[in-house]
Image: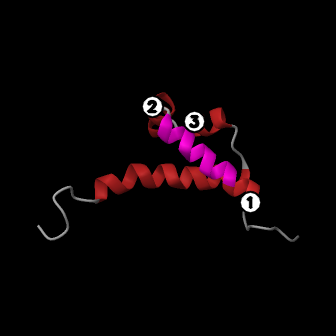
Amino acid sequence: MDMDTTPSQDEAQEILDALRQIQANPELRAEAETNPEGAMDRLGLSGIARHAVAFAIAGALVVPHLVKPEGFWT
């Protein structure tokens, strides 16, 4: 079984479009924070695009809690 795990140009564009939609739509952004699966279902994502967007959502939710607002050196 030979699986191609390299995203194609179409998949990359689908990922970027989904992330832009989430960023631009406050309702979709709120849903992504509370119900990421539902947000990805609304966007019709599957396969590599779904995994990439899920990873981006998780990163967006976790990173702000790890980074101190006052900065690294204080």
Q: What stretch is highlighted in magenta?
A: 13-24
Q: Main secondary structure of the magenta part?
A: helix
Residue at left 72%, top 46%? 46
Picture layout, residue 67 above or below residue 72: above
Against 65, residue 28 (above or below) is above
Q: Nearer the viewer, residue 5 or 11?
A: 11
Label 1, secondary structure: give it.
Answer: helix
- Secondary structure, mark 2, is helix
**First along the sequence among labels 1 and 3:** 1
Looking at the picture, which amino acid does disc 1 mark?
Gln
According to the image, label 1 marks what residue? 9
Residue 65 in picture, x, y percent from top left: 30, 53
Circle nearer the N terminus (2, 1):
1
Position of 68 relative to 5 (above/below): above
Q: Which amino acid does label 2 sit on?
A: Pro
Q: Residue 26 carries which label?
A: 2
Q: Residue at x 22, y 58 (%)?
A: 68
Judge whether residue 14 is colored magenta: yes
Q: Residue furthest left?
A: 74
Residue 30's place in the image compared with 15, above or below, is above
- Magenta highlight on residue 9: no
Residue 39, numbered circle? 3
Amino acid type of the residue that numbered disc 3 sits on in the rendered structure: Ala
